[in-house]
Image: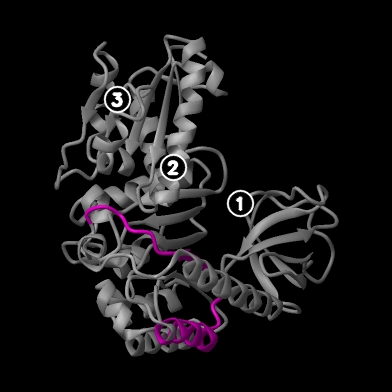
Amino acid sequence: MSGPAYRIEVYGCQMNLADAELLAGILEADGWSPAASPEEADLILVNTCAVREHAVERVVGHVKSLGVLKQRRPGLRIGLVGCLAQFEKERLAPRLPEVDFFVGPDAYRALPALLRRALRPQYALAPDAQETYADLPVTRGAGVNGWLTVMRGCDRMCAYCVVPFTRGRERSLPAASVLAEARRAVAEGHVALTLLGQTVTSYRDGATDLAGLLRALAAIEGLRRIRFLAPHPADFTPRLLETISREPKVARQLHLPVQSGSDRILEAMRRGHTRAAYLDLIREARAAIPGGALTTDILVGFPGEQAEDFAATVDLMREVRFDAAFLFAYSPRRGTHAERRLGDDVPRAEKRRRLETVIALQEEHSRARFAERCGRVLEVLVEGPARHPATDWFGRSSDLKDTVFAAPGAPPRVGEIVPVRITEATSHTLRGERVRPAGPEPR
């Protein structure tokens, strides 16, 4: 390892993981090398999410533990970067004297200059409505999956969400830049790409919308699977659903955050869609992608949520029967419309009870939805050896379900797609065996 060493530790969503690869690219272009452990690092960046209060406290605790390491290694520098640095600098700077600099999501280019200065603490937090980092390469890790940021920021202004305050307004990367980066990722072995944006279905570069971008990406030789996160239900178009149904490289899975099944709460949340419109989209999606998977986000205990509102959410879950869901209890975030105007009137114990209810219900639905795959042959993208048993292999099906499978005979190649007959299922994993083609083994 040559030059000073860096380490990036990530808290939060897939956008934070993609930003970590962008930060790594910036540092390596400036002469830094990755460190194998915190003890070997000259610089530790903690890349953060500000969406939930629990995540904030986890980050604070971790930075405090890094401060102990810094006492033993006075030359170590610690940076807090990302959404939390942008949103909570005033609150966190006094609590975290261990931090040498705070860098927001639009100021990553400033990092090399900050590292050349001895002053501390330093701040690079100015929002930049034009910044897309489209001209900067990223440093991806190993594995067949790769992140591909196609837009930044969010215009939605949901009542509970801080993302518009931390990441600014929506701006799409040029389609040509996205395609060039996709080709580079595939050449490096990342044959499955996940397109990222806070509201990725809003993507537009001139005449190219998300449907057009998917079609262009599907034409890239060697790219085997494409998915996208995180869409907004109000932005889905018939053209997008048609593209998903016709392009075999696009995963047969849609993540459609609903948040609540109550129209009254959806309006208070400023979601921009109704229960009926959402259920219409679900029906259209299932017609366009038969046998595909549907996942969602649900937030319980939002201000003003009454028993009948929560019952409407449970009823929607029973009607749709999602394959999986990310389930949360509401916590107020400073500066949002909900925090400023709506209060926090659902008791903590009731939030916990509602969260436990939807978790139990989703576990029941996931178990049933996964079990429906038993007996079917699914196309599985091989990611590598399984952890248990070590003789098996791990991959993801075309509807993005974790799949462990036996492969007697010649082992599969990482990055190839193989047919697997599903024989068992839990609520989180499929198990099966690779299907061999009829006839003699290929030489």
Q: Which mark is residue 161?
A: none
Q: Nearer the viewer, mark 3 or mark 1?
A: 3
Q: Position of residue 140 (x, y in %)?
A: 46, 38
Q: CA distance from mark 2 to mark 1?
A: 38 Å
- Which class describes the residues within 10 Å of circle 1: few (<14), some (14-19), or many (20+)? many
In screen coordinates, is 186 left or right of 302? right
Q: Which mark is residue 101?
A: 3
**Sequence-earlier tag: 3 or 2:** 2
Q: Amino acid at mark 2?
A: Glu
Q: Amino acid at mark 1?
A: Gly
Part of the protein shown in magenta = 308-335
Q: Position of residue 95 (x, y in %)?
A: 35, 30
Q: Which mark is residue 415?
A: 1
In screen coordinates, is 386 left or right of 355? right
Which residue sits at x=82%, y=51%? 389
Q: Return the residue at label 2.
A: 57
Q: Secondary structure at mark 1?
A: loop
